Image (tube, rainbow, N blue to C red):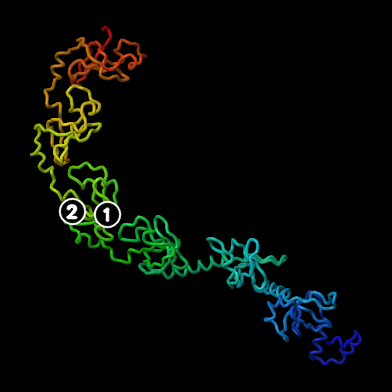
Amino acid sequence: MLENNIEDKEDLEGAQDGIEPGSFEEAYYQSIKNLKEGEIIKGKVIAISKRDAVIDIGYKSEGLIPLEEFGGSENVKVGDEIDVLLESVEDENGMVVLSKNKAEKIAGWERILNNYNESDVIKGKAIRKVKGGVMVDIGVEAFLPASQSTLRGPIDLNNLLGKELDYKIIKINKPRKNIVVSRKEVLAQERAQQKLKTLEELEKDQMRKGVVKNITDFGAFISLGGIDGLLHITDMSWGRISHPSEVLAVGDEVEVVILDFDKENMKVSLGLKQKTPNPWKEVESKYPVGSNVKGKVVNLVPYGAFIELEKGIEGLIHISEISWTKRINHPSEVLAIGDIVEALVLSTDMSSQKISLGLKQLEANPWLDAPVKYPEGSHIKGKIKNLTDYGAFVELDENIDGLIHVSDISWTKKISHPSEVLKKGQKIEAIILSVDQENMKIALGIKQLTEDPWPKYAENYPVNTVIEGVITKIASFGIFIEFAKDLDGLIHISELSDEPSVNLEEKYKIGDKVRAKIVKVDNETRKIGLSMKGI
């Protein structure tokens, strides 16, 4: 050691006189003369113990640096020259205090300041998790906030640890020597560049491979590498699809056709069915009008049934084309999904991709013979099949019904609902009033079985005639009195002998006998007005 040969300042000065310019001793002397605490200086490893490396910096004493600062004993050997920070020229043991890590940090910080600015991209390795993010080694330690670690999705900082990646410097705080970096902005920039590159490569009708990224009710988003395209549900298959998940799943690799793209708005429309020929191109020759076809019922809606004739080709049987005679409220009354049915092609429209089918056309139309079988004025017998607010349907045979309108039940009796007179399942006789072959309707009448009694009633019951009858109905505006067979008259509330505020249902009961005077006879509307005043 030099300190064994040079005892004091005088010896040092004397030794200096004997040093040749440019020799190791000259450099050694100069290093001793110019040492300053806080500086980065050169040192040499001269020995290695179990815990430390002994560093010679050309001073009267050596310094010790823990092997941890080298990353272990395997990373250092005798003779290595390293940069160290001189923290102190002498500690309590008379040795210099050195730090390799601090020298590297200072050198790294100066390198960053000299070579990088905010917004520059730098390589770094995430070394450990801290509160709110990760510390990244970029030559010095920089902080990566968790919010800046990924573009979107769940954040797992463990995925970054130990990986050397690009980071963007978003903030440099010189006074505090702090640096904040972002991985998110690098990913965003890379994605934008990839998106532009992909858009430049796109061409209409081009085939591209992609991965299903997301599925919605209206379609699927396909990642093409830097940009996502929309594969609409209508472009997935020539056939019927209720939901995109019937065809694709997230993560599937799929080949699609570029239908269209907008570079300005970065939108891409994709197709899957376009990879195969359009089956509708030959539909008119394959399914000519008037031909019989077979297919499977694939959907039922209130207005009809959809029949799959082949993959991608469906026809509609409208509810009005299911039966000549049956009154069908919903196709499910006759058909079920999965049924194999035979139908007749009524029309085809390739442009709108529609085929109209008929089920009833496979059977003879019973209405063709209806005018001959049921001539107007003829008497029929039938069973009441159904009652509605406006009349009663009578089954003439298994295929044809006739309607007795509520106005054709009685010549004179006021009937609000056919159930007042008729019952479902009741067998009755009626007269054919009209046959409408085109609209498939037959009008029936009951009252026409007897002679119209009104002319006689009008003659026998003139105005001012006093009658006696039975209450048949009580309304808020008056009471109805039957005083002859099927002949009613109305006593308006203003023609009752009671006070106007009286409650009619409290004072009068159906079946009560009353006397009244005829005050009005209307031959046109066949109504008779009565009054109890003066009786």
From the viewer's side, name the closer residue of 503 and 24.
503
- The image shows residue 326 at horizontal and vertical percentages of 20, 42
Mark 1: give few (<14), some (14-19) or many (20+) Cα within 10 Å.
few
Residue 140 x, y percent position in the rendering: 67, 71
Q: Residue furthest top?
A: 534
The quarter of the image holding the N terminus is bottom right
For badge 1, the amino acid type reads: Gly
Residue located farthest toward the left when viewing the structure as drawn: 372
Q: Which residue is mark 1?
A: 338
- Binning the other alpha carbons within 10 Å of mark 2 as few (below 14), some (14 to 19) or many (20 upward) gives many
How many numbered circles does the render carry? 2
Q: Quadrant of the C terminus?
A: top left
Q: Position of residue 205 (x, y in %)?
A: 35, 67
Residue 23 drawn above or below residue 366:
below
Q: Is residue 512 left or right of residue 412?
A: right
> Do the CB atoms of the residues marked 2 and 1 lie less than 8 Å apart?
no
**Residue 375, placed above or below residue 51:** above
**Residue 71 x %, y %:** 68, 77
> In the image, which is nearer the foreground, mark 2 or mark 1?
1
Check disc 1 and report its element: helix, strand or loop.
loop
- Secondary element at tag 2: strand
Q: Residue at x 33, y 17 (%)?
A: 505
Residue linked to disc 2: 344
In the picture, measured across the screen, residue 83 lies left or right of residue 283, that is right
Residue at figure coordinates x 42%, y 64% from the top left = 212
Q: CA distance from mark 2 to mark 1?
A: 19 Å
